[in-house]
Each structure stands twice: as C-alpha cells, then as structure tokens.
Image (tube, rainbow, N blue to C red):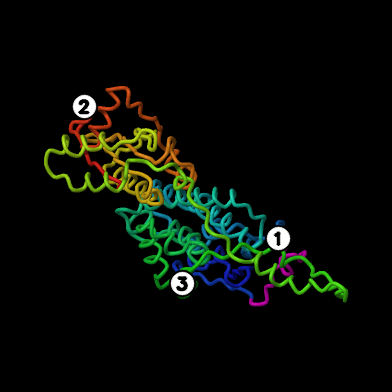
Amino acid sequence: MALVMHTYKGNKSADKALIVAEYVGVKITVPSDFEMGVTNKTPEFLKMNPMGKVPTLETPEGAIFESNAIARYVSRLNGENSLNGSSLIEYAHIEQWSDFSSLEIYANILKWFGPRMGFMPYTAPGEEAAIAALKRALDALNTHLTSKTYLVGESITLADIITVCNLNLGFATVMTKSFTSAFPHVERYFWTVVNQPNFKKVVGDVKQTDAVPPVASKKAAQPAKPKEEPKKKEAPAAEAPKAAEEEEAPKPKPKNPLDLLPPSPMVLDDWKRLYSNTKTNFREVAVGGFWEMYDPEGYSLWFCDYKYNDENMVSFVTLNKVGGFLQRMDLARKYSFGKMLICGKEGPFKVKGLWLFRGPEIPKFIMDEVYDMELYEWTKVDISDEAQKERVSQMIEDAEPFEGEDLLDAKCFK
C-alpha cells in the first residue's frame, strides 16, 4: 500500500504517524521537495486538505488530515495490535489520553511558543494563562504517572506516541529543565519513551531547550526608514548615542510590594526556627511562642479547604496533589508559612490548610502565579474568635484527631 505523508521536515505532529508506522511495520514515504507555503497552496493539495494544513496523508482510498486521525488510521493498517489496547476500556483510555494531551498540553504549548516566535499576537496575560493551564495539565499527567511506566497498560500504546510527540514540542522549545523539574514523573516518562528505538528512528536524539525564546521583536518586522542627511548646524546630534544607551540600559528589577510594607515586629524566620527546633512541650513552647510573636497588623492568617475532596479517593494521589501545591508555593517562601493536613483513614480524604502571609491579604503575585490557589476555598482567620484561634493552634501542632478525624499526613511549608 503506497502511503505518502505531505509535510515539512521536522514537523513533530507528523512524527506521530511515522512512529506508529515503525511499530506496525508500515512504510510511509515523505517527499523531500515539500515546501511549506507553496506546495500546500496548490490545487492538488487543497483537494486533499481544503485547509491547506499539514500533515496530510495520501492513501489509495483517499486523503486523511489531522495528525491524531492519521496516527489512528496507520495504527490499524496491519490489523489489531497492542497499540490500541486489549479491551474496550483500554481503547477508551487510549483515546482519553490522546485527546487530553492534544487539547490540554499541546494546545497550551502552542499558545506559549507561537506568540514568542511571532506566529500569533503576543500578550503577557495570554502567555501567563497558557502557562498556568499547561502546568495544571502537566500536574494531572504527573499524578497519573506516579505509579505507571506508560499511560495505559504495561506497554507503549497509541496514547504514549501521541502524548510524547505533543510533549516533544514543549521540551524542544519552551519547557526548560527548571520548568519540567516540577513534574518529575512526566520527565521520567518522556525520556523513557522518546528514547525507545522506534522513536529514535524518527525523531533522532532529542535535546531539551536551555532557555525560553525571547518575544519576537515587532520592530524587526518594520521596513527601515531612509536615513536623513544630518543638518550641519545641529551639533547636539553627538549626544544621541548616549541617549540610546540610556534607553537600552537594563531597568532595575521592581521590588516585591511586600518588601515595601512597614516593618513588622514579627520576624518570620524567628518563628520558623522556633517551629523547627521545638521538640518537647510543643503546645506551650511553639504554639505559645507563635501567639506571642504574631503581628495582626503585618501578617494575616488564612484557612483553606480543598473544593473537590470527593475526588480524593486514593491516598498517594492525594498526598502527591498536596506535595505539588507546596512545591509551586516555593516562590512565596520568603513571605509565608503553611500547614496542610490530610484527614481521614480512607477516601475520600479531606485536605485542609492554614497559611500565614505577609500583609493583610493573600499576596496578589501568589494568586496570579500558583494556579492551585483557585482549587481551595480561602477564609481569613478572625483571631478575636476563640474557636478559630484554637483551630489555628491545633493545625500548627498537628493535633490528632483533628475535627474528629485521624490524620493521614501533615505537611509543613516553611
């Protein structure tokens, strides 16, 4: 069967079907003379794909476009095989992860990478939203892979091929090591799969990007204005280079607004040391010391309760979820202290937290940068209410039982 893949060299979406072909023993020819912007605008190509997009697969039975559809087609050319699972539920899960990685991961990588390369308009809020959505998707994938080598079953399936090809765009362009290190199971999974022999035949040696590319300069795209002859009488023109240098000089990094708040008698590091070093009489020494130090003018206390506790049916998944949240809170370490309690002997487990933040409100940069914040209900503590004050004390000391339930675990952020 003659199969021809119309695409440009290096198209990571086209890699999906080419890798599948290696697994099922199918030959696909990729013409070397394809020219993006030319070949895909010809009447012959537009008959196969009216959108003029790539990849497009030409088969004796007709053309197919959309990379996932092409990969699914190729995966079945030599009959049923392990790439499509061994049962109806496995097949459904393969479809599930294939769609998830395309809609939640690949789409947000494009929204991050595309504007930086000038393929679409760049806005800082748009990029921040794309990165937040991508982090949330990778966190879900990371949790799923905590105890799994592959997405479905015990061997590579179509879901792994599609997902790793989708991830490959991110690893190669914008997802640096400092970004992906927050998702260790995704990292392990990606490098395990992408280094399989059938992958390497198609993608070669994959390298992770060292830096996020700078935003494409709008000025570079504008035609240069013709130079005007300088007027002889305008001697001050010699000052122009100096002015340009001043404009191009790097601006000092703006201070965090929390650093500009009036000094507080409560020194956060002193409290963290007291908490860490108290080994006996914790309630009297550490908790009592906290209330002596606490400055309600310079700091605020907050309870948080996870909104979706009914989903917390598996203990290690719940613990990983909380661990990931604390990891992403690292940017707030200088300004906060937190306790997270996971309550219950069996699912659904309840996740409850206590946080101390510098300032009278939850800092805006934390709300903006840590997407997990929206997964919790946040309630400011009223320390004039003795019941709330006692709840704070119990959460600091990991009191058990807490509100009538055993503690599965208690995590501290300090």
Distance, label 3 to label 1, CA atoms, is 30 Å
Mark 2 lies on a secondary structure that is: loop
Q: Are marks 2 and 1 in contact (CB under 8 Å)?
A: no
**In the rendered structure, which amino acid carries the disc numbered 1?**
Gly
Mark 3 lies on a secondary structure that is: loop
Q: Which mark is residue 207?
A: 3
Give the camera-side residue of 19 and 265.
265
Where's residue 224, x and y in %? 79, 70
**Quadrant occupied by the N terminus:** bottom right
Q: Which residue is mark 2?
A: 404
Distance, label 2 to label 3, CA atoms, is 51 Å
Q: Residue at x 54, y 56 (%)?
A: 109
325 w.r.t. 250: above or below: above
| Residue 386 location, quadrant | top left
Relative placement, left or right, of 341 versus 381 is: left
Q: Which residue is mark 1?
A: 52
Please check the rendered image and state whether residue 36 is part of the magenta-colored stretch, yes or no.
yes
Q: Residue at x 32, y 48 (%)?
A: 323
Q: Is residue 304 visible?
A: no
Distance, label 2 to label 1, CA atoms, is 63 Å
**In the rendered structure, which amino acid carries the disc numbered 3?**
Lys
Where's residue 172, x and y in %? 50, 67
Where's residue 295, x and y in %? 34, 35
Please check the rendered image and state whether residue 387 is part of the magenta-colored stretch, yes or no.
no
Mark 1 lies on a secondary structure that is: loop
Q: Nearer the viewer, mark 2 or mark 1?
A: 2
Mark 3 or 1, nearer chain start: 1
Residue span colored magenta: 32-48
Mark 2 or 1, nearer chain start: 1
